[in-house]
Amino acid sequence: MTDNQNTQQQIILAEPPKMKVAMRTDEVITRFAEAVGKGNAMGYISSVLVAVAASEDLQKCTISSVVAAGLRAAIMHLSVDPAVAHAYIVPYRDNQNNTYTAQFQVGYKGLMYMCIRTNWYKHLHLVDIYSDDVLTENPVTGEISLKRGSTSLVAQRNSKIDVMPTGHLLYMESVKGYKAWYFMTAEECEEIGKKYSKSYYDRTGLPNKKSLWHKDPVAMHRKTVIRHGIQLYGYLDPQDLANMNAYDDVEENGQDESEFLKGINFEQITTPSADQSLSELGQEPGAQQAPIETQATTAPEAPATDTPAPAATGISFDEAAMVKSPEGKLYIAMSDKDLKDAEQAIGKTLAGELNGPEQNAWLLRLEAVQMILRARTAPATQPTLS
């Protein structure tokens, strides 16, 4: 057994992929297919698995809550892949019962995307406003003009400087020439969160430090401005608007999983055995030379740059086509040269010290790159996307 295979064996034995098994049951795939179509179902399922792989707290959540949150994202046609950031699956801990549940949450980028896909907008732009910016409004036309201050210019050029926006301005222009401006201060956005968001405070009435309202307040302020501005002056597809109203109910009253998961029995889902997991690596069951604790204790050598570590699990070509680089670019859209460069870079990353979730995310990227490269070298048998 090679050092790379031994390393992957340890990962698989330490972290049995029960979530992966649950997400790929016929019942769950069917439910996602009903939401986004058969050809897109596995792509959305993969985005959920990537999100879970990147978060240790999400891995502690009940499988049913993760699946329900993923289905809500699919119904709204929003990706929960952290690289895309259209929406999030957020883990919440119940301190009384010491349990974790996952909940779906729309991001401001997801709201912008929902607006853009209506084809109603010619321009849709959100501007962060800082303390020394000067906003002036024409009282007759409602047109707003902005004169930038020095703080804004510094903040735009150097993200390391900790300067918080004092407000946000949304500009909308339709393809037919309609224009509108909408402005809210950061304080106004914060008051909205305190009043309407269930996640703003924890069960004891104190600020919930794990809520996005406290972890990333600027993103939540942007989302608030976009949502209110669109409701007052913009346009959203009626189905998307209905889904957003349903999402508001989830945020206010908690997630009702029953409507999404009826007919799915998660109790029957079992953790794969070590032999089953190892078979996904192409190894024969029982092929390991010795128990892991008795194998060589020296650290495995870093793989050579021309032979990156093989990926640990199997995915379909459709799933591989949905995987993105850390920069958010689809691997399927890259040239062969860029793919080979990415393969080498991922191999070097995997040779470093990574925790379990990071390792899983990078292994998924590696397998996607390798599958796309293999498909391109065998065009006669290349799968086609539905």
Image (cartoon, grey):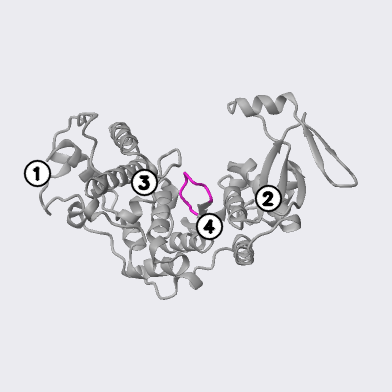
The amino acid sitting under disc 2 is Ile
Distance from the alpha carbon under mark 4 to that under mark 1:
44 Å
Place residue 359 in its image quadrant: top left
Q: Please tell me how crowded label 4 is: few (under 14), some (14-19), or many (20+) other residues with Cα within 10 Å.
A: many
Q: Is residue 368 above or below residue 234?
A: above
Distance from the alpha carbon under mark 3 to that under mark 2:
32 Å
Magenta residues span: 79-86
Residue 239 part of the magenta-drawn span:
no
Residue to which mark 1 is pinned: 289
**Sequence order check, earlier mark of 2 and 1:** 2
**Sequence order check, earlier mark of 3 and 2:** 2
Q: Nearer the viewer, residue 299 or 242?
A: 242
Q: Please tell me how crowded label 3 is: few (under 14), some (14-19), or many (20+) other residues with Cα within 10 Å.
A: some
Q: Which mark is residue 226?
A: 2
Residue to which mark 3 is pinned: 332
Q: Which mark is residue 233?
A: none
Q: Which residue appears at 24% of the width and 35% of the height? A: 308
Residue to which mark 4 is pinned: 104
Q: Which residue appears at 17% of the width and 36% of the height? A: 3
Q: Quadrant of the N terminus?
A: top left
Residue 81 part of the magenta-drawn span:
yes
